[in-house]
Amino acid sequence: MKTDMVIAGVGGQGILSIAAALGSAALDNNLYMKQAETHGMSQRGGDVQSFMRISDKPIYSDLIPKAGADIILSVEPMEALRYLPYLKKGGYVVANSSPFINISDYPDEDELVKTIEALPNYILIDADKIAKEVTGSTRAFNFVMLGAASPFIDVPFKYLEEGIREIFGRKGEDVVKMNIDALHAGRKFSQDNK
Amino acid sequence: MQKSLLLGVEAIAQGAIDAGMSGVYAYPGTPSTEIAEYVQHSKLANERKIHSEWSANEKTAMETALGMSYAGKRTMVCMKHVGLNVAADCFMNAAITGSNGGMIVTIADDPSMHSSQNEQDSRVYAKFAMIPILEPSNQQEAYDMVRFGFELSEAFGTPVMMRITTRLAHSRAGITTATDIVAENEMSLPKDKQQFILLPGIARKRYKLLLSNQEKFEAASAESPFNQYTEGTDKSLGVVACGLAYNYLMENYSDGDCPFPVLKVSQYPLPRKMIEKITSECDKVLVLEEGYPVVEEMLKGYLSKEAVIGRLDGTLSRDGELNPDMVAKALGFEIEEGMAIPDLVAARPPALCVGCSHHDVYKALNEVIAEYGEGRVFSDIGCYTLGALPPYRAINACVDMGASITMAKGAADAGLIPSVAMIGDSTFTHSGMTGLLDAVNENAPITVIISDNESISMTGGQKSSAKGKIENICAGLGVHPDHLHVFTPLPKNHELMKDIIRKECDYQGVSVIIPRRVCVQKNIRDQKIKKALKAKAAAKA
């Protein structure tokens, strides 16, 4: 059992909550995990990434080698492409289709979609829209994304639910349910659109 | 077995709390900030009243920690690598005084300069000071090493450096924490009443003691549980892997099938016998180390008589942080290149937040500076350094904490009038005040803008030592009240701001302008906390 994934986004989008749920899921089930993240200057609206590694054997490097990631999970479409050098042959790109535009030279959105659709294995999902439909707010879009990536993550799905319960438990059952609903909706989309 | 999910820096903080630390002293700086922050939020630390307030700068932090060590208690001082430059005076002399209570100096280096001005290697400083270094290879070791480090420090009466780098600091792993929590030390004065008095006569004796301790430090490295020699069958190459670099080596042999002898180094001074063994039994030695080629240079020698490869001969890049691919290549593996980044991917540099007060300051400043000609704005370290990037391109220098004011003065001394300094509130109280005193004493024709957002924002909104006292500090240093202005930087005050800047640029003496508006990120966080407290109070009632 081993999954290496790059989680990508823009500083402030909250990619670390995805990593936290996964990390908690891994730890509770006696798996090894390492998760390297970006702090400091680049958090101010710059591109940010987290390297997430889960395995049933000890993990050495905090960084994933080039062409080593099973999944690129990106909460923003252009950011998914920035990490293609890390994608393993046969690996999946799971990207949110809602762009985060805070630069003047952001690429043409149709071109962006075409580029992602030209990849061998991809899931392009409007996580903001699905989160809104299922939970009534876009807040849980991160967990729609994790759900969409879940069929490709070599960790039992129920562990992910437990991970969400762990990190949101103290915020109350409503918040837990919202994020678990989002997780299921994302997973369903991927299974229907693989 | 209890496991906690912790960043490397958090593991160090938890390790220090569990090892009986009585106080942490620090100034925020990526990637070291979260050590003190973790202690601030730790339940056990709060119950024990472990000191964790921020210091005004790294030098005051180091000195205060030394004071706590003097009084017999265990203490840790934390900073980023360039912070050690600020604290170097105390650091070098603390090696001579030695410690009483255990003292660990935790320095977080930032190779590849993710959030820094340079990538200096703090191991050079520890070698300079002649004190032991602990360099963890992973988060668990980082946790375990703190307790070990306090014991080492107390056994030899010396401060010990814990050196980490960005990837270890900001990577999370499951940590097994200790079940036996160490009690804090009782207060106790040093046995030798003169130990901390560095008068030449005493300092000479203390220095001789430090020199004679070197052998003991080396013996400790030889016996250290963190330094390991693994035999190998293929002696055409031996690998010396220091700290985190050990992981990049093992990543390539994750089934434990490395054919070469490997020396893992996580405690310095170098374990001499193991070094002798690997150099004598192997045809060639590859040194893997994060940062400068410190060990490589020592093994190779000035005349390059030893067959040592690494960063100096191009086997590995001379600059930047290591990664598993670079190390794989150095070991002779084929590297698989992934797909290329498509051309349409645009750079997304960091930027000032929407609504940030620095926007208003730079808009006004740029318009006024255009009237005098460009090339006269000396800036400093903080979010406002982003004023160097488009759309503002407003600044001409950013060197070290506080250099804005003194560089502006030097340029004014050379005839560049007006010269403008642009500095933040926390950077001003860190290292700007003394420079302002120099300027006041000579009434230098400079205009100092202290863009006050009441927070240390770049590192995550820590409390600034300025605490709303900046105008009083400036007045106390002798800035004339007529040339000391405080106002709110908002778009509606644009013209007012320009008038003030222009007026003070024309004034042939020191002036200080303080645009004050709280950091937008800090404001959001504060509102959230307020709301949560209100809800809590309502639930109680």
Image (cartoon, grey):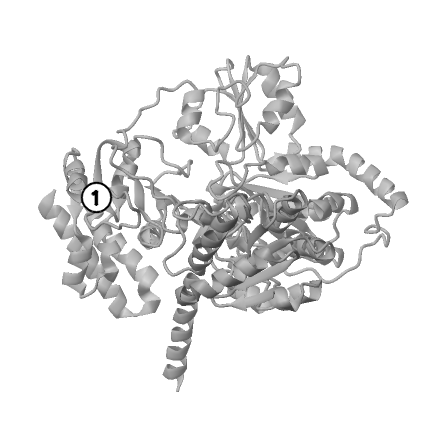
Question: Residue A23's x, y, as percent?
Answer: 35, 50
- Res B451 visible: no
Which residue corresponds to the image point at 44% horizontal and 26% vertical from the top-left? B327
Q: Is residue B499 above or below residue B317?
A: below
Mark 1 neighbour class, 10 Å CA radius: few under 14, some 14 to 19, many 20 or more: many
Do we see residue B72 in this rendering?
Answer: yes
Seen in the image, is B524 located left or right of residue B20? left
Residue B324, located in which quarter of the rendered image?
top left
Res. B483 image quadrant = bottom right
Q: Nearer the viewer, residue B290 or B381?
A: B381
Q: Residue furthest left?
A: A192
Above-or-below relation of A137 to B269? below
Amino acid tagged 1 = Val
What's the chain of the residue with tag 1? A
Residue A145 percent location from the top left of the image: 22, 51
The residue lying toward the viewer, choosing from B318 and A144, is: B318
Relative side of B179 to B302, left or right: left
How far from the left and from the top, in percent, is residue B54? 59, 60
